Amino acid sequence: MKNIFILTFILSFQITFGQNIEYARGIVETLCSKEFAGRGYVNDGNQKAANFIKAEYKRLGLQHFNGDFYQALGFPVVYYPSKVELSVDDVELAPGTEFMVNAGCPKVSGRFKILYIDSASIDNSSEFTKLESKAGNKFIFFDHLKNTKFTHPERFKLVSNNAIKAKGIITRDLEKFTWSVHPEWADYPVVQIKKGRFSHFMIELKIDIDAQYKFHNTQNIIGYFKGKTQPDSFIVFSAHYDHLGMFGESTIFPGANDNASGVAMMLDLANYFKSHPPKYSVAFIAFTGEEIGLLGSYYYTQNPLFPLNQIAMLLNLDLMGTGDKGLTAVNATQFKDEFLLLQTINADSNYLVSVNARGKAQNSDHYYFTEAGVKSFFFYLMGNYHFYHDVHDSYEALTFSKYDEAFSLIRDFTLQYQK
Ligand SMILES: [Zn+2]
């Protein structure tokens, strides 16, 4: 079923070959489809995405370094393959949109009373000392105290960090959920409830979260085109293909902008270099394990397939699905000449409304390359798009507003940089 699906997709986009944005849309739509399960740790999503990208590498005629495009690695992960249920006072809430749990949330099930913590129980010393015995086997709730001026703010901090050893914590001060994925268990469950979902005094919570832990075997996917005149110098394009996966059996985090869009642009650039052989060698790395802590790119920098000092420049693409508010280059302040070239090209060709400089940041897969002395930029596009690490970051929602312009800017930069 999966193979037929992929084959049909490949045949259908060859017709539109050469139209960047249509190709990119097709890749994002596929990577965000139900079949790929948010490219995480439920229903084999991460592996299905890898197989799809590998098939694309093959179709594009990329070469591999070690007899295969895959570089195997693994890491532990906490994941949520089955039951994720929550009711408050017998009202059932929908996962992903009405409630979420913290990344790494431990397995928890049962009925628990909710303990509202008031300002007196923080500031009154005899009340405060009773808190630990009162909170046992209850979920505590204290968001209504957020703007309170305490005589003992340090006590409130202790309560917020669950030093009073409650069963769990409820929060509902968030406008939107921002989920994540963790390699280890959190100490206790934190249940986020959609703001405004309950205005009454909550009494009891019924929860059933089936959390699992496994060692996940995965891979980076690496291919290249050999350069015509300077094959020992490499331009590397990278983009992480993993995302958060699923929360239970039906809630998918599709990760369209983060980072199906970056993978799509990377493959689109490979498409370009297939018909325009580069001077330098051009390598493409689809990283795994970014969301869990840059684990794929870290592994690669420790186990490179060709010497890191042969990388003339690494361009990491993450969040490439918008662009109406311009592009940001992380490491712009580290590599000023390269950033000036980027800005000049953008101004001359009028591609994007702005190209912004940002300093060093440990926020995507370029980071460990920079640390290893490799010249690198991390590019992300900005736009009117507010979905991030939530169930709404979907193919249908993604705008692709300045996709072609951003693609052209990065292509031109690569061509001029090789001169
Ligand atoms: Zn990302």
Image (cartoon, grey):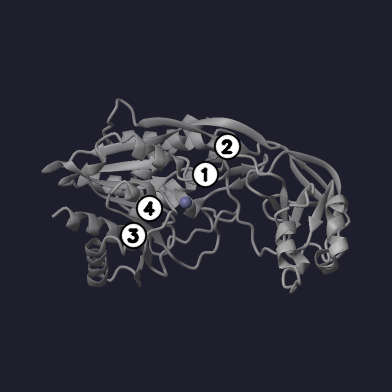
Q: Residue 77, labelled with which disc?
A: 2
Q: Nearer the viewer, residue 64 or 153?
A: 153
* x, y percent for residue 13: 38, 44
Q: Quadrant of the C terminus?
A: bottom left
- N-term-proximal mark, 2 vs 4: 2
Q: Secondary structure at mark 4?
A: strand
Q: Is mark 1 within 8 Å of ligand 1?
A: no
Q: Nearer the viewer, residue 235 or 74?
A: 74
- N-term-proximal mark, 3 vs 4: 4
Q: Nearer the viewer, residue 272 or 247?
A: 247
Please rate how many residues cluster around mark 4, counting C-alpha atoms within 10 Å: few if below 14, some from 14 to 19, many from 20. Answer: many
Give the residue at the far front of this rendering: 125
Q: What residue is shown with label 1? A: 292
Question: Of tags 2 and 4, which is closer to the observer?
Answer: 2
Q: What residue is shown with label 3? A: 331
**Residue 234 placement: quadrant:** top left
